[in-house]
Image (cartoon, rainbow, N blue to C red):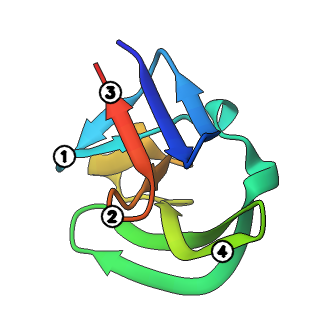
């Protein structure tokens, strides 16, 4: 199993170990290049996962607002993705096999 998240030709995340939840690839924190991520004040709530926080991705002058999210303190049923980062497929090219 391998997954990659890219903006144009820049790799944002790359891993051989990930979780898929509701069709989204969740990358472990250690596989994400955090130099491209800027925390935002945006949050959202999922009934079973909990409160999500967001990142804006900044690559070579291009800013993709709130293009990534993670659950810093998920509910019990989502503990397997605690801190893992997912990306909006409409903004970031995510491939997995």
Residue sitting nearer the eye, 48 or 69: 69
Of the residues under marks 1 and 3, which one precedes in the sequence? 1
Which residue is found at the position 34% from the left and 40% from the top? 25
Residue 67 picture location, percent across and down: 50, 68
Of the residues under marks 1 and 2, which one precedes in the sequence? 1
Nearest-to-viewer mark from 1 and 2: 2
Quadrant where the C terminus lies?
top left
Total numbered labels:
4
Q: CA distance from mark 2 to mark 3?
A: 15 Å
Q: Which mark is residue 96?
A: 3
- The residue identified by callout 4 is 63
Which residue is found at the position 21% from the left and 73% from the top? 47
Of the residues under marks 4 and 2, which one precedes in the sequence? 4
Of the residues under marks 2 and 3, which one precedes in the sequence? 2
Left or right: 11 in relation to 37? left
- The residue identified by callout 1 is 23
Which residue is found at the position 73% from the left and 41% from the top? 33
Q: Which mark is residue 90?
A: 2
Mark 2 is surrounded, within 10 Å at the Cα level, by few (under 14), some (14 to 19) or many (20 or more) other residues, namely few
Of all residues, the one furthest to the right in this rendering is 35
| Label 1: element kind | loop
Q: CA distance from mark 3 to mark 4?
A: 24 Å
| Label 3: element kind | strand
| Label 4: element kind | strand
Q: CA distance from mark 4 to mark 1?
A: 24 Å
């Amino acid at each position: 199993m391998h997954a990659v998240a890219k903006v144009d030709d820049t790799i944002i995340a790359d891993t051989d170990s990930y979780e898929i939840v509701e069709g989204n690839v969740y990358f472990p924190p250690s596989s994400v290049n955090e130099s491209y991520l800027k925390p935002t004040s945006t949050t959202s709530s999922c009934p079973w996962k909990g409160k999500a926080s967001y990142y804006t991705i900044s690559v070579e002058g291009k800013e993709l607002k709130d293009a990534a999210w993670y659950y810093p303190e998920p509910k019990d049923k989502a503990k397997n993705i605690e801190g893992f980062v997912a990306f909006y497929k409409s903004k970031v090219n995510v491939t997995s096999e």
